[in-house]
Amino acid sequence: MSFHPAFSRAAGKAALLIVQTGSTLPTLRARHGDFPEWFRRGLGLRRDEVDVVVAERDALPPAGTYAGVVVTGSPAMVSARERWSEDAAAWLRGAIDADVPVLGVCYGHQLLAHALGGRVDYHPAGREIGTVAIETLEAAAGDALLADVPATFPAHSSHQQSVLELPRGATVLARSAHDPHHAVRYAPNAWGLQFHPEFSVEIMQGYIEARRPALVGDCSIDCCNTRCSRPTPLARGLLRRFRAITNRSR
């Protein structure tokens, strides 16, 4: 396999790499683009400042040639241990060893945990979906990504699997009532977010609508209509914070 970036880097310009681990629903992709475009917009980057590699199809390039790496969400499950996913996990260990700033979101967050020796599987309490309250913990106060974030803030969430056991050395930065590991620092320059800072209200609503048949009768979710989706500016702002971290690493 070869590396086929969806967006090309400008010559001589440090770029951010987006590792795409899956695709969104066809209805959402038609209206809003796919996962890499959501992240690019949230990061505030031009297309020529971002490279995209599709982990299931493409060879992963040397991480050290980039100022930072973002790993997207996916409809796949980390616990399935597909070959491409295991290869990406090994690649992430190398990126962390090289001190490249890494941000994993949802599947990307879980993949980081798995890569470093944690355990990922289906959450025993089931699905978490909708705009949820995220509570920052004491460790967030001195963290480069979450410092000065309020004690609680809303964020979009949609997942069935979670990080059930953290790898050695990981630090929990934020949690929800459902998931105790919503934001984790895995290494000095590597973070995982279970929630989705790249989601807009419209995208969150689209996922709720698509998952409606699975939600009906689930009293633990209370999310069978789109009213449980609302703006999440603080969560979205974490993407710009990560961009600032990558700028400092150049």
Image: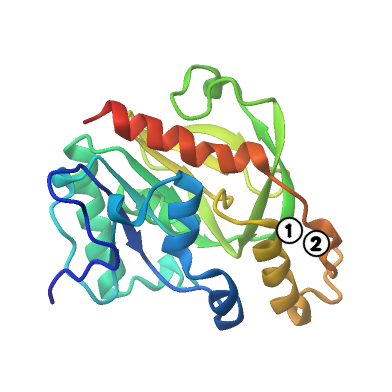
Q: Residue at x 70, y 49 (%)?
A: 178
Q: What crowding class fits label 1: few (fewer than 14 Cα within 10 Å), some (14-19), or many (20 or more)?
A: many
State left or right for residue 61 relative to residue 27: left
Q: Circle 2 sits on which residue? A: 221
State left or right for residue 115 relative to residue 191: left
Determine whether label 2 and label 1 are within 8 Å by CB. Answer: yes
| Residue 119 position by quadrant | bottom left
**Nearer the viewer's eye, disc 2 or disc 1?**
1
Q: What crowding class fits label 2: few (fewer than 14 Cα within 10 Å), some (14-19), or many (20 or more)?
A: some
State left or right for residue 186 relative to residue 6: right
What is the x, y in percent for residue 162?
54, 56
Q: How many marks?
A: 2
| Residue 128 position by quadrant | bottom right
Residue 39: mark: none
Amino acid residing under circle 1:
Gly
* Viewport quadrant of the N terminus: bottom left
What is the x, y in percent for residue 37?
45, 62
Q: Is residue 53 visible to the viewer in this orientation of the structure?
A: yes
Q: Residue at x 46, y 32 (%)?
A: 241
Q: Residue at x 54, y 24 (%)?
A: 140
Amino acid residing under circle 2:
Ile
Q: Circle 1 sits on which residue? A: 130
Callout 1 secondary element: strand
State left or right for residue 184 relative to residue 197: left
Does 186 appear above or below 138?
Answer: below
What is the x, y in percent for residue 69?
31, 48
Q: Residue at x 47, y 37 (%)?
A: 240
